[in-house]
Image: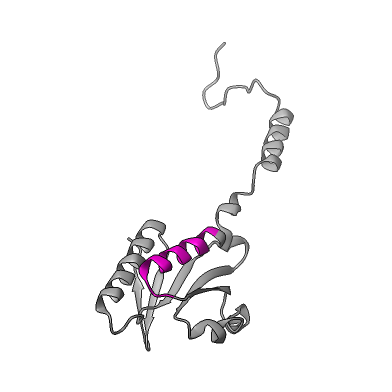
Amino acid sequence: MAIPRGQPPPSPWPPLFLLLLYLLLLISSPSPLQARPLLLQQSINVAVVFSGSSYQNEVRGRLSGENFVDMPVVVSPVTVLVNDTNPRDLLTRLCDTMATEKLHGVVFEDDVGVGDDTQVAEVAQILDFLSTQTALPIVGISGGSAVVIPFK
């Protein structure tokens, strides 16, 4: 049987069956936009890391999404309180927070242990490692300046 040139070959399935199969696949599959949560809802979760015991009473309950009402997206700050500024405690708290919350970024005051340069270097290395492994943007704030650890 020869097929005329320019004509598609006839389908072995009737068009109605193909349409029903396509609709069934569309209904049963998860939404393709679920992999991109920013397209469905314009909100981001940002971990704000406070270190030291002086912040414990000041910060609790004061930082909320209402502080960011004028932003084009809904910002949900996730407060992370770290009593001790040792690198192990910091890494443990950040990993626990990332396990429970879907984070889009981290803001951290990087002037912890100002008198101890080794501790500042260790914290910077941990944040750099964390940013590299998770592709999570981390912003370090010291006084009035900010440093962004870029995606690698």
Residue under the point 69% across and 40% down: 28
85 in magenta: yes
- Name the chief secondary structure element in magenta: helix
Q: Residue furthest top?
A: 1
141 or 86: nearer the viewer? 86
Asked if residue 130 lies left or right of residue 58, the reply is left
Could you tell me residue 22's position as x and y percent?
A: 67, 36
Where is residue 38, by image quadrant? bottom right
Q: Is residue 70 visible to us here? A: no
- Relative to 66, say whether 9 is above or below: above
Where is residue 113, by image quadrant? bottom left
- Relative to 2, say whether 150 is above or below: below
Q: How is the image coloured?
A: one colour
Q: Which residues are magenta?
A: 84-99
86 in magenta: yes
Could you tell me residue 81's position as x and y percent?
A: 50, 75
Residue under the point 64% across and 49% down: 31
Could you tell me residue 104's position as x and y percent?
A: 49, 66
- Relative to 73, say whether 131 is above or below: above
Residue under the point 38% across and 89% down: 144
Residue under the point 54% across and 61% down: 102
Q: Residue furthest left?
A: 117
Q: Is residue 130 visible to us here? A: yes
